[in-house]
Image: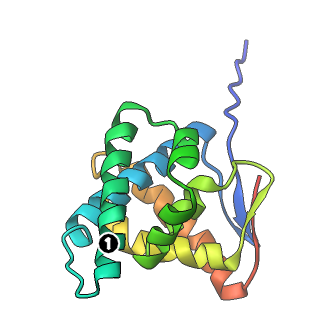
Amino acid sequence: MIIQIIIMGIEVRCINKYVDPSYHFWNAFRIETVFATIRYFKSNIENKKYEDACEQEWLNKLTTYMNNMETEFKCNTDLDMLYTKYFQGQFVELLILHGISGLYTLCYKPDTEAYYTVGNAHDMLSLFKLIKPYYDKSNPHYLTLLKLFSAVLRESVKTKSIIYIR
């Protein structure tokens, strides 16, 4: 008797570059990306001081968002909660201002029948360049997926082609 196990997954493809992790690992990767971004933020952005009062106020707001998100996300790693509670207008603008808007793109897109634009690919590549050192080193599979997924993103930027999510 042969038992066949089929693991459902996601495929992210641009021309001949693709990555196809299981749904479970794709979500685990996105969750770890949230935590890596928070760790990057705390090490590199949170303590900046701006001369411009408006910029300092925006940084203070982002710090509050990040701290609240970290606290809640440690208890409930539900990406839907992240979308509905945090990935709203001003928070997204704050991510853009600090060069980490790729987090929104990665976490907000659905797992099937969706697309990443060339601009989305660029934003995620920029994010990954900043946060790569902040990924959990105890699970090397995150960095492997990061490398493979980044190759898909680079293909999109290089060829100016859409990325398909299936």
User: If the image is split into quadrants, where does the N terminus sit?
Assistant: top right
What's the amino acid at mark 1?
Glu
Which quadrant of the view contains residue 47?
bottom left
- Residue 151 located left or right of residue 16: left
| Residue shown at 50% from the left, 51% from the top | 86
Q: Which residue is tagged 1?
A: 57
- Residue 155 located left or right of residue 165: left
Q: Is residue 58 above or below residue 68?
A: below
- Residue 146 located left or right of residue 47: right
| Color encoding of the figure | rainbow
Q: Is residue 8 above or below residue 53?
A: above
Percent of width and height locating residue 132: 36, 66
Q: Is residue 134 above or below residue 95?
A: above
| Residue shown at 24% from the left, 72% from the top | 44
**Secondary-structure class at tag 1:** helix
Dot 1, how many residues are within 10 Å of its Cα: few (below 14), some (14-19), or many (20+)? few
Percent of width and height locating residue 123: 54, 75
Question: Could one spot residue 63 in this view of the protein?
Answer: yes
Name, please, the residue furthest toward the top.
1
